[in-house]
Amino acid sequence: MPAFAFPVGYFYEPIAGVFAISPVILFSFRALLLRGPVRVYLFCAMLACFAILVFISATGFTTQRYEVDFLPLLLLTSLVSFGVLFTERTQLARALLVTMFCALALYSITANMALGIAGPYDSILENRPTNYIRLASWFSPVEHFRPMLNPTIRVGMTVRFEEQNDGFREPLLAMGGQAHRYLLYAEQQGNKIRLHSHFHYATVSADLSSARNTPIRLQVRYDPQAHRMTILEGEQILLGQDIPLLVTAPSQVKTGVNVAEPGLAAPLFTGSIDTFEHTIIADGTRATQ
């Protein structure tokens, strides 16, 4: 990952791809091995499908939005290819093919239903976070990856900065990865460092009293009762920010990494971070330390 900040307004748009949400279309490539008139028709359908895909890809920023323009045609080719393949096989081979097809179809239905429930812009997490947390807990057997609503968080770290150009911004601590996420990042200004606490569309900033070329001890605290994030330099409170709703899994509380806000800071911290405390507590149970 590059050690520089992306342009302001740059953002990631999550893309799964057609094979991830509809693996049944893999049967379409079987059409290339068929014989007779059916091969010509299926080949033309696949050619039209890929022509549409290339055209959409060339426009930029729209490929994932117009999958419906080429995916149904590719799915039709897959179904016909599967039907031809099915008629050419023995009874045992047919049973195996049907089992494989049903498994892929069931996976496709489940994956698309999950994407539909979550919404393309994390709508259920944004508007009904409690329901989202409950649904996510059903499919998150590993506690380290299970999202939590307003957990108690305590992170302590000793930070050493590498000299960069004035205005260079790099991440110190990230929490969450979708809606209701948080990012603490630093901006270099000469020999000084300015910290920015960012949540949603609000940012609170303060200058560190320590010089850039010295190790800096920082502590980050999130109090779910007060709904407030507090950053301490040494033992002194540097800044605080009200955060009414924080959603994060223990695995998403990361130091020196920024994947959620590429327009605010570089993807990686260029110096070194030594963590001396990393505690996340949900409902009175320590999730990680």
Image (cartoon, grey):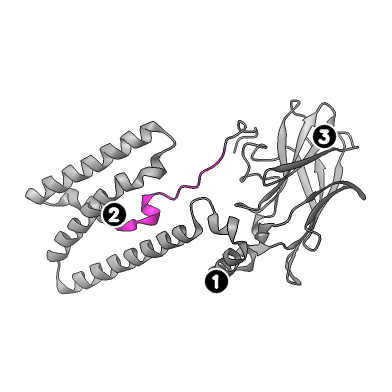
Residue 111 quadrant: bottom left
Q: Secondary structure at mark 1?
A: helix
Asked if 47 appears above or below 29 in the picture, the reply is above
Amino acid type for the residue under numbered disc 2: Ile
Asked if 107 appears above or below 159 in the picture, the reply is below
Residue depicted at 56% across the width and 39% down the height: 11
Q: Where is mark 3, residue-wise?
A: 193
Residue depicted at 81% across the width and 43% down the height: 159
Residue 252 quadrant: bottom right
**How far across and how far down the image is residue 161, in percent?**
79, 36
Q: Report the disc number at residue 25.
A: 2
**How far across and how far down the image is residue 126, in percent?**
59, 55
Spatial CA distance of label 3 from label 2 is 52 Å
Amino acid type for the residue under numbered disc 1: Trp
Nearest the viewer among 36 and 139 is 139
Amino acid type for the residue under numbered disc 3: Ile
Residue depicted at 64% across the width and 64% down the height: 144
**How far across and how far down the image is residue 166, in percent?**
76, 26
Instruction: State left or right for residue 130 relative to residue 123.
Output: right
For the N terminus, the quadrant is top right
Nearer to us: label 1 or label 2? 1
Instruction: State left or right for residue 241 relative to residue 268.
Output: right
For the C terminus, the quadrant is bottom right
Spatial CA distance of label 1 from label 2 is 29 Å
The stretch of residues the image draws in magenta is 11-24
Q: Where is mark 1, residue-wise?
A: 138
Instruction: State left or right for residue 37 relative to residue 220.
Output: left
Q: Secondary structure at mark 2?
A: helix
